[in-house]
Amino acid sequence: MVQKEHSRKKEEIRDESTGADKIETLIQHNEAGTKTWLPLEYDLNLTYGNEICESFEKTKRLRDKVREDAVKLMEEEKNESRI
């Protein structure tokens, strides 16, 4: 019983860590700006890591914030191209 609980807790920590790693990748993309993004990265910045991050409140909130930042960058790029 204790072994199962320990294994479950290790898996949960690994999953939360995986979510944090995905968020870190997205933050780096946002920091670099849209001029460095490949076309496929526009969609990825909105969806990458969503499923794993939804499992934990902290990663969910952080993922939502990083997504908002990506949307702002895309909107800024769109507005700049109109000028």
Image (cartoon, helix red, strand yellow):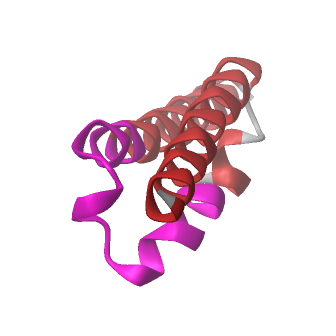
Please tell me whether residue 31 belongs to the stretch shown in magenta: yes
Q: Looking at the image, which residue is at 23% across and 45% down? A: 32
Residue 57 in the figure: left or right of residue 24 = right
In x, y percent, where is residue 54? Answer: 77, 41
Query: Which residues fall within the magenta stretch?
Result: 25-48
Residue 55 in the figure: left or right of residue 58 = right
Residue 50 in the figure: left or right of residue 44 = right
In x, y percent, where is residue 65? Answer: 64, 27
Q: Looking at the image, which residue is at 62% across and 46% down? A: 71
Q: Residue furthest front?
A: 83
Count of residue discs: 0
Say above or below: 27 vs 32.
Answer: above
Looking at the rendered image, the quarter that the N terminus falls into is top right
Question: Is the stretch drawn in magenta largely helix, strand or loop?
Answer: helix
In x, y percent, where is residue 81? Answer: 46, 64
Q: Residue furthest top?
A: 58
Q: Nearer the viewer, residue 10 or 1?
A: 10
Q: Nearer the viewer, residue 34 or 20?
A: 34
Q: Looking at the image, which residue is at 56% across and 52% down? A: 79
Q: Looking at the image, which residue is at 58% across and 26% down? A: 6
